[in-house]
């Protein structure tokens, strides 16, 4: 008599769903572990709450910042601070127009790349490598600016705020470039006038952010030694070095802006623009 295999079939039918459930549970557990480890690594390498601080913006802040960058003549650049447990801490950009942010600078860079792409399309020369070159130029320029800032601060023995604020301020130059490129869409010769004005306006804005915004300041030991007999002359020399650094780094912003402006492709969207 041949033994029945019905029992084995029932066990196989029952075991297959259990095996799939076990595999699914194991995959989910492994995936959750990978995600958790990735988040832990990012939290150790990147200060996410600090970055979120610089993305806290409002529509009102953006309008004020655009006016500050393009018309930086009559404005008080002193930062607003809030005392927390006896320690003065800056408020986020949504509460202080003088606080640098990353959102506006990032959007201006993306818009700059988009307008450059429009220019290449208009000339019938669009190629992804052109946009890659523009992006590489932007990254290289910002990296060189941060390096120059760090070297100048170290050479002059000056302290500075978070380097992310220096990056945020440097990104604002693309607002002026966009203004010039938009002006060229209406009347091409107007481009060079707006570009020259934007470069000089941004140089002044950069100076005031570094000096009045106190992104560059004197070393902590100088603040403790202000009651010393020679504190006055020494403090004056430190302030003089800070002013020199802000002036020359601000003046140095004109060259990169003009260089990026001359490298841009022509953009024409109106029929009267040749």
Image (tube, helix red, strand yellow):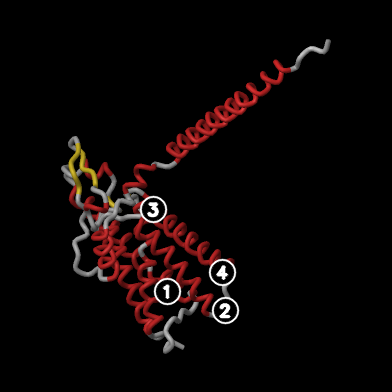
- Name the spot of residue 189 as percent of width and height, x first: 40, 86
* Residue nearer the viewer, 113 or 160: 113
Q: Distance between the Cα atoms at labels 1 and 4?
A: 19 Å
Residue 195, relative to residue 162: is it above or below?
below
Judge the density around disc 1: few (<14), some (14-19), many (≥20) Cα neighbours within 10 Å: some
Q: Which label belongs to residue 237?
A: none
Judge the density around disc 2: few (<14), some (14-19), many (≥20) Cα neighbours within 10 Å: few
Of mark 2 and mark 3, the one earlier in the sequence is: 2
Secondary element type, mark 1: helix
Q: Distance between the Cα atoms at labels 2 and 3?
A: 48 Å
Q: Are marks 4 and 3 in contact (CB under 8 Å)?
A: no
Residue extending furthest toward the right: 1
Residue carrying label 2: 124
Is residue 6 visible in the rendered structure shown here?
yes
- Name the spot of residue 179 as percent of width and height, x first: 36, 74
* Residue nearer the viewer, 183 or 229: 183
Residue carrying label 1: 258
Q: Distance between the Cα atoms at labels 2 and 1?
A: 25 Å
Residue carrying label 4: 130
Residue carrying label 3: 155
Of mark 1 and mark 4, the one earlier in the sequence is: 4
The residue drawn where x is 35% and y is 71% is: 176
Secondary element type, mark 4: helix
């Amino acid at each position: 008599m041949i033994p029945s295999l019905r029992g084995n079939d029932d066990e196989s039918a029952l075991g297959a769903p259990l095996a799939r459930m076990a595999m699914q549970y194991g995959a989910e557990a492994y995936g959750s572990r990978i995600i958790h480890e990735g988040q832990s690594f990012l939290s150790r390498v990147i200060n996410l709450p600090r970055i979120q601080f610089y993305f806290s913006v409002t529509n009102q802040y953006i309008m004020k910042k655009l006016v500050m960058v393009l018309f930086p003549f009559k404005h008080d650049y002193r930062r607003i601070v809030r005392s927390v447990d006896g320690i003065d801490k800056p408020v986020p950009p949504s509460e202080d127009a003088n606080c640098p942010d990353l959102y506006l600078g990032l959007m201006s860079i993306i818009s700059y790349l988009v307008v450059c792409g429009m220019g290449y399309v208009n000339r019938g020369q669009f190629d992804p490598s052109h946009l890659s070159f523009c992006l590489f130029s932007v990254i290289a320029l910002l990296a060189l600016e941060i390096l120059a800032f760090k070297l100048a601060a170290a050479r002059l023995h000056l302290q500075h705020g978070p380097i992310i604020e220096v990056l945020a301020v440097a990104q604002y130059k693309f607002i002026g470039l966009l203004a010039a490129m938009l002006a060229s869409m209406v009347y091409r010769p107007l481009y060079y006038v707006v570009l020259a004005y934007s470069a000089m306006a941004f140089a002044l804005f950069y100076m005031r952010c570094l000096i009045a915004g106190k992104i560059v300041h004197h070393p902590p030991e100088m603040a403790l030694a202000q009651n010393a007999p020679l504190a006055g002359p020494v403090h004056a020399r430190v302030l003089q070095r800070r002013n020199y650094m802000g002036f020359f780094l601000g003046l140095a912003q004109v060259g990169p802006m003009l260089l990026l402006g001359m490298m841009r492709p022509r953009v024409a969207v109106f029929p009267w623009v040749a």
